[in-house]
Image: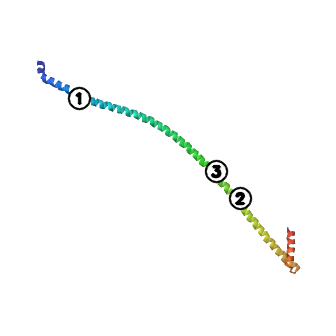
Amino acid sequence: MKLFNALGLNLYILIAQLVNFAILVFVLYKFAYNPILDFLKDRREKIEKGVLNAKKADEKMEEVKIKEEEILKEAKKKGREIAELAKQEGEKKRKKIIENTKEEIGQIINQEKEKMRAEKGETLKQAKKEIAELVTLSLEKVLDIKMDSEEDKKIIQKTIKSLK
């Protein structure tokens, strides 16, 4: 004890402080240390779950990317098919329009030919009529007499037949 006194320590106070320290350690162990350890354990588990979930999410993202690429490829393929079908349909319509136009042009040409034939026939009729009148006038001058219309017609018809 003299040694403790020489160092300036009181043994009773030192024992009391050791008891107080032991009580403090016990209380901290009981009420603080275990809850802190439980909290840290829960926190560690949550972090591990988060990491695991992140890995799963990464795996799912990779799967989604692969599916997305497949869907894009399929969509591009279908788009090309649709474009090809549209092109074929356009080509069919173009051919049909050309065919219809050719038919219409053919009809117009035929109509114009008919008009030309009719006009030609009309022109020939008029020419024959004028020729007949000229023949009649020339015959009148030559014969210096006027014939009746029945005789005129007969002579004109004979003259026209001879011209053909």
Q: Is residue 87 visible?
A: yes
Residue 112 vertical position relative to residue 1 in the rendered view, above or below: below
Q: Which mark identifies residue 11? A: none
Given the image, on which type of amino acid does mark 2 rest? Gly
Residue drawn at x 60%, y 48% as measured from the top left: 87
Q: Colour mode? A: rainbow
* Residue 117 picture location, percent across and down: 76, 65
Residue 12: name its quadrant.
top left
Callouts 3 and 2 close, C-beta under 8 Å: no
Which mark sits nearer the N-terminus, 3 or 1?
Answer: 1
Residue 66 vertical position relative to residue 132 in the rendered view, above or below: above
Q: Which mark identifies residue 28? A: 1
Residue drawn at x 37%, y 33% as measured from the top left: 49
Q: Dot 2: within a 10 Å radius of its alpha carbon, few (fewer than 14), some, or many (20 or more) residues?
A: few
Which residue in the protein does label 3 denote? 92
- Lateral position of residue 109 relative to residue 61, left or right: right
> How far is disc 3 from disc 1 in space, using C-alphas?
91 Å
Which mark sits nearer the N-terminus, 2 or 1?
Answer: 1
Q: Quadrant of the N terminus?
A: top left
Residue drawn at x 35%, y 33% as measured from the top left: 47
At mark 3, the secondary structure is: helix
* Residue 6 picture location, percent across and down: 11, 20
Residue 111: name its quadrant.
bottom right
Which residue in the protein does label 2 denote? 106
